[in-house]
Amino acid sequence: MLYQDTMEHTHRRSGLRTTTTELAGAGQMTDAADATSMATVARVPHSSLHLSKPTWWLESRFHFSFADYWDPARENFGVLRVLNDDLVKAGAGFGAHPHRDAEIFSYVVAGQLSHADSMGNKEALPRGCVQYMSAGTGVVHSEMNEGSETCRFLQLWITPDRRGHKPQYGSSVYDKADRHNRLLQILGGTGASPAWPKTAKPQSIHLHQDANVFVSESDPLTRFELSLGPKRQAYMVCIEGGCWGVSTHTDFATLNPRGISPRGKHTHTHTSSPREATSVRIT
C-alpha cells in the first residue's frame, strides 16, 4: 500500500476494485475443474508476496491484488478475495472508512487491535482473537492500534453469497489452549464443516458463504491429516514458526501460503510442524 498517512490510506483501502459473486467458493471449485483425480498444490514463496512501501506506522504483505497493487494471476482464491498481513505501530491504524458486500475478518497475531463501527460496536481484542464484520449494504469502521506495542493481524475478505446482506459484527475470544495442537474453527459458513480429526468447533462466527476458517498453534512435529471432498479447495498459511508442506514435505517459511485444489474424490493431505508453528487454514 503506497500511502503517506492514515487519511490517504483510508481512502485507498476502501477503494478496492470489486469482483462478482460468481467465483468458485473458498471451499468450492467449478465443474470444469473436476477433470482429474489428482490434487494440485501451489506453493507461493514468501519472497513473492507483495510488500507495501513502508511508512512510519504500517507495513503490509498482500497475498492477492489490493489497492494500487495488481497482479492478474493473484486476483483471488475462490471467494477468498483479500489476505493482508499488517504490522501497525502503536498509536496508529486505519481511520474510519466504508465497506459494503464483503465478509471481513481480522485474526490478531500480536498486540491489540481496536475496532469501532457505525453500528455502535467498539472493542479491543488481543492475540488469538477474531473480529468479524459482514459489510452488507454498507458500514463504516476503523481499525486502530491503541496499545503500547506493534500490532500484527491478518485481515481477510471473503466474497459473500449475494449482495445486500444486513450489516453485522461479531467477535470471539480464545485462549492458546483452544487452538493448541488442534484445529480451532473460528468461522463457519453456509455449508458443512470438514470432519477433520483434532478439530475443535465451538460456537464459531457465521459467514454468508460456503467457507470455513481454522487456526492452530502447534508444538514441533505435530501432525494433522486433512481430507478435502470433491470440488473443495483449501488455502493454508503458516504465520509463525515453520510448517512442512502438504504431502510433499517441502519446508516453507513464515507467511507462506498454499493453495490446495483437489480434483474428484477425497484427497488426503498432511501437515507437520518441524518447529512450533501457528497456521491458518481456509477451506
Image (cartoon, helix red, strand yellow):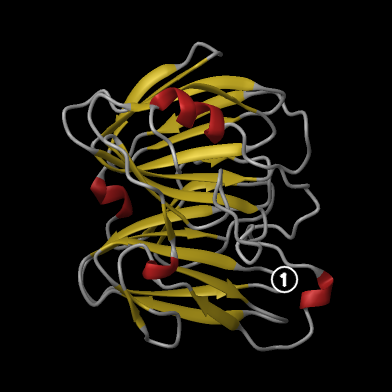
Q: Quadrant of the C terminus?
A: bottom right
Rendering coords of residue 169 (x, y %): 54, 25
Rendering coords of residue 263 (x, y %): 70, 80
Towards the viewer: 10 or 220: 10
Q: In this view, does 199 lie to the left or right of 177?
A: right
State whether residue 170 is above or below residue 202.
above
Q: In which quarter of the view is residue 40 placed?
A: bottom right
State whether residue 251 is above or below residue 166.
below
Q: In which quarter of the view is residue 247 placed?
A: bottom left
Q: In this view, does 238 lie to the left or right of 134?
A: left
**Residue bearing mark 1:** 231
Report helix, strand or loop for mark 1: loop
* x 77%, y 47%: residue: 21
* x 37%, y 86%: residue: 249
Rendering coords of residue 255 (x, y %): 36, 62
Residue located farthest toward the top when viewing the structure as drawn: 120
Category of crowding for the residue at label 1, using alpha-carbon neighbours closer than 10 angstroms: few (below 14), some (14–19), many (at least 20): many
Q: Quadrant of the N terminus?
A: top left
